[in-house]
């Protein structure tokens, strides 16, 4: 999923991003330190969101391993 956002303003260490989609307007707080160099109020950004299947599987495995250790500890 890819969409554009405009930096509306800065509020301390946060940038307020404005995202419009299908007639709706959303405001998202984003850390200023994670913006591209030179970006400021009025700058347009491309934002891409992708699922991290490998990360999800690693998280599931960590939880599974933790549950197994807890079960063994309580036996």
Image (cartoon, grey):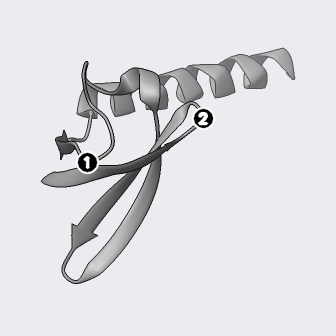
Q: Is residue 1 visible?
A: no
Q: Is residue 45 above or below residue 19?
A: above
Under circle 1, the secondary element is: loop
SS state under label 2: loop
Crowding at dot 1, Cα within 10 Å, few <14 / some 14-19 / many 20+, comes out as few
Q: Locate residue 58: give its quadrant.
A: top left
In the visual, does 32 lie left or right of 73? Answer: left
Location of mark 2 (residue): 12
In this image, 68 relative to 41: left or right?
Answer: right
Say which mark, if any, is on residue 59. none
Q: Is residue 37 above or below residue 5?
A: above
For the point 57% across and 28% down, the residue is 63
Question: Is 67 placed left or right of 29 in the picture?
Answer: right
Query: In the rendered image, which quarter is residue 20 located in?
Result: bottom left
Above or below, comparing residue 63 to residue 9 in the picture:
above
* Residue 10, x across and y down, in percent: 48, 41
Quadrant where the C terminus sits is top right
Residue drawn at x 44%, y 54% is: 28
Task: Report the residue at 87% width, 23% height from top.
Answer: 74
Observer able to see residue 67:
yes
Residue extending farthest bottom = 23
Q: How many marks?
A: 2
**Label 2 environment density (alpha carbons within 10 Å; few <14, some 14–19, many ≥20):** few
3D distance between C-alphas at marks 1 and 2 = 17 Å
Name the residue beneath numbered marker 1. Answer: 42
């Amino acid at each position: 999923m890819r969409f554009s956002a405009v930096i509306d303003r800065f509020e301390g260490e946060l940038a307020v991003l404005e995202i419009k989609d299908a007639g709706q307007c959303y405001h998202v707080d984003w850390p200023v330190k994670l913006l591209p160099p030179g970006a400021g109020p009025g700058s347009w950004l491309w934002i891409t969101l992708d699922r991290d299947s490998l990360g999800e599987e690693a998280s599931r495995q960590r939880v599974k391993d933790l549950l197994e250790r807890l079960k063994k500890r309580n036996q």
